[in-house]
Amino acid sequence: RKKLIIDTDPGIDDAMAILTAMNSEEVEVIGLTTVFGNVYTDTATKNAFKILEVAGKSQIPVAEGAHDTFAGIKKDWVPDFVHGDDGFGNMNFPEVQGVKYPGSAADFLIETVAGQPGEVVVLALGPLTNVALAMQKDPAFAENVGELVILGGAFFVNGNVNPATEANFFGDPEAADFVLSQPAKTRIVGLDITHSCTFTGPELTGLHGKGRFGTFLSSITAFYLKYHRDSYDMDAVYVHDPAALAVVLRPSLFTWRTGQIRVLTESVARGMSVMDTGLKRWNRPHAWTDRPRVQVAVAVNAKAVTEMLLQRMAL
Ligand code: BDR
Ligand code: CA
């Protein structure tokens, strides 16, 4: 079983991914680290405890992450119209307790990975602030992490915050650009993939009463479904974060291309991800030249991915 730390901004699709991981034999979730994104960081931490309670896994530690971006910018906005004020579709569940790691998320990542080099997979489902801080603080972290799987970016399609930019990279572009300059074994799943991974309205309501988490998931996803109906005119939701978990579970369901990535930190396209696919041998160096090559998902067997995810959410 792969040891898995999930860095997360829960968030409705984050909750779907974390709970699916709990029903997946291939992985053992050994900790959650929280970050702002869908909600502010303190809400993300409360929601991580709630998810663990729903899973019956309240002994798993939660490490609270950064409140400000990698460049020190204070967050003053969250997309409450996507995930609700509370991050759970305004269900306003009562607060629950759990095990809080005494240090920061970056410290938890560093300590856990250093203790078992090459063994720990980090699944990053929110802005990359905590991962960037871990890489900055411990230069060995990038080499020691078994694999880094990132949900972020929009490479050959429009973004979801604006036409250029996907939400997680938009949340902390400096962090994303820094992380993708580091030598970790990295796989990235962006909107190119997740915009073909959907659950329909009836599939979501059908989760009610199923398994250990079905009722919880169908309750929080009603709000998320309404957002998709209003914004994309479809009776279905994108399962972004669960699709990234599917990479950890079954990478062969995706087609991969290797490339070097920059994330723009300036201009109207701040947060945009641009990959050099290697088609051209450039005549002179440019801002991508010295970057490590990372794996970017460019196609997916969406039917196999969504069937696997839906089945595990109903267990
Ligand atoms: C990403 O942004 C958040 O809204 C989701 O949880 C997902 O991680 C999709 O762009
Ligand atoms: Ca997320």
Image (cartoon, helix red, strand yellow):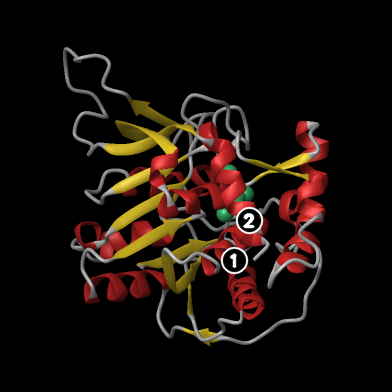
Per the image, the residue denoted by label 2 is 311
The structure residue drawn at horizontal position 58% and vertical position 57%, both measured from the top left corner, is 75
**Horizontal placement of 108 versus 57: left or right?**
left
Distance, label 2 to label 1, CA atoms, is: 12 Å
Relative to the observer, which residue lies in front, 40 or 112?
112
Amino acid type, callout 1: Leu
Q: Nearer the viewer, residue 251 or 175?
A: 251
The x and y percentages for residue 270 are 49, 35
> Relative to 221, does residue 304 appear above or below in the rendering?
above
Instruction: Mark yes or no: residue 267 visible.
Output: yes
Q: Position of residue 64 (x, y in %)?
A: 49, 74
Residue at the location (32% across, 38% down)? 295
Q: Position of residue 180 (x, y in %)?
A: 32, 44
Pick whichever, 250 or 242, lies toward us: 250
Residue at 57% across, 51% down: 308
Q: Is residue 167 visible?
A: no
Q: Does the beta carbon at disc 2 come under 8 Å from ligand 1?
A: no
- Label 1: few (<14), some (14–19) or many (≥20) C-alpha neighbours in 10 Å: many
Q: Is mark 1 within 8 Å of ligand 2?
A: no
Quadrant location, the N terminus? bottom left
Mark 1 secondary-structure assignment: helix
Q: Residues within 10 Å of mark 2 (few under 14, many from 20)?
A: few
Q: What amino acid does circle 2 point to?
A: Gln
- Pointers 2 and 1 in contact (C-beta within 8 Å): no
- Choose the circle earlier in sequence order: 2 or 1: 1
Q: Position of residue 282 (x, y in %)?
A: 20, 15
**Image position of 287 (left or right of 47):** left
Kindly identify which numbered label has been placed on residue 19: 1
Q: Tell me the residue at 45%/56% (across/down).
A: 124
Q: Secondary structure at mark 2?
A: helix
- Numbered label attached to residue 60: none
